[in-house]
Amino acid sequence: MKPLFYKLFIVGIAAFLIGGCNSATTSSEENTSAATATQEVNPPAEEFNLVGSDQKAIKIADEVMETMGGRVSWDTTRYLSWNFFGRRTLIWDKLENRVRIDMVDGSMSAILDMNNMTGKVALNGVEQTEADSVSKYLDRAKSTWINDSYWLVMPYKLKDSGVTLKYVREDTTQTGASADVLQLTFEKVGVTPENKYEVCVDKQSKLVTQWAYYPSANDTTARFVTPWAKYEKKGAIMLSGDRGQFQLTDINVYAALPEEVFTSLNSVGLSNYSTL
């Protein structure tokens, strides 16, 4: 933030010092109020690296959240479903922290309560009962959910726990659009905290329109770059499934789903349930 300069008409050094102290106090109070207001709109997660992140990046992240529906809309969205690259479908109960994953080829189905890592697993239609096997596949299901959900909802997670957010530059995307570029690095979160992302936020729309993935925070060359395109409103939020050569499809948001979606390994069809 640029400092405030006051044109002071003073007589003597004492008056100058008093004016300077009062100005500093006012500026500090204004900064605190502004920061509080911002946090009320889009508060960071408990272990977001607020000290290590910069204010310009945080301001842009808050603009992204507002453009995509706002924090309240995101927090109150409960059920999401999508198909990941044509390989598997996921149904996520965001409120209760549960997920169901069904491989399209029928090789595996898993239901996982991520609060306590309990659930059920079926391989090729046969429910597994051996504890070690179930535990292994539930761990795999959580890793799958971490990956697949990030591809879908990353713009809502710019101020997540363990994230350090930096403004790195202005640039143009692969489509030639002007964008602000934010860098995300991680500490003690996810399954690959050594990763780094550069996220392009369109200057006009305030939507994430591109990202670049780096396996290591020290890398200078991205492993891949893909667009974030074709946003659609789903319920009260905005979601995008177009990642260029990669596609997330059948993206839906539901107000309600039957409990058996997250308790029974029997095949479920969501076509009878109303989307938002």
Image: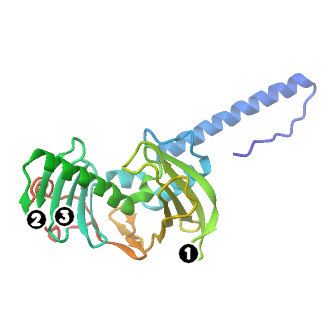
Q: Secondary structure at mark 1?
A: loop
Residue carrying label 1: 174
In the rendered view, would you say 213 is above or below 263?
below
Residue 275 position within the rendered picture, expressed as x and y whole percent measured from the top left: 24, 67
Instruction: Give the mark nearer the N terminus: 3 vs 1.
Output: 3
Q: Are marks 2 and 1 in contact (CB under 8 Å)?
A: no
Quadrant housing residue 276: bottom left
Q: CA distance from mark 2 to mark 1?
A: 41 Å
Between 56 and 118, the residue placed more toward the observer is 118
Check disc 2 and give the amino acid type. Answer: Asn
**Residue at point 47%, 70% (across, down):** 226
Residue 93 - label: none
In this rendering, is residue 6 above or below 216? above
Image quarter (top left, top right, bottom left or bottom right) of the N terminus: top right
Circle on res. 124:
2
| Residue at far top of view | 14
Report x, y in % for residue 203.
59, 66
* Residue depth check, mark 2 versus mark 1: number of the one nearer the observer: 2
Disc 1 crowd rating (10 Å Cα; few below 14, some 14-19, many 20+) is: few
Examine the image and state in which quarter residue 127 appears. bottom left
Q: Secondary structure at mark 3?
A: strand
Q: Mark 2–mark 3 contact, CB under 8 Å?
A: no
Question: At label 3, which amino acid type do we have?
Answer: Asp
Near mark 2 (Cα within 10 A), the count class, few <14, some 14-19 or many ≥20, is few
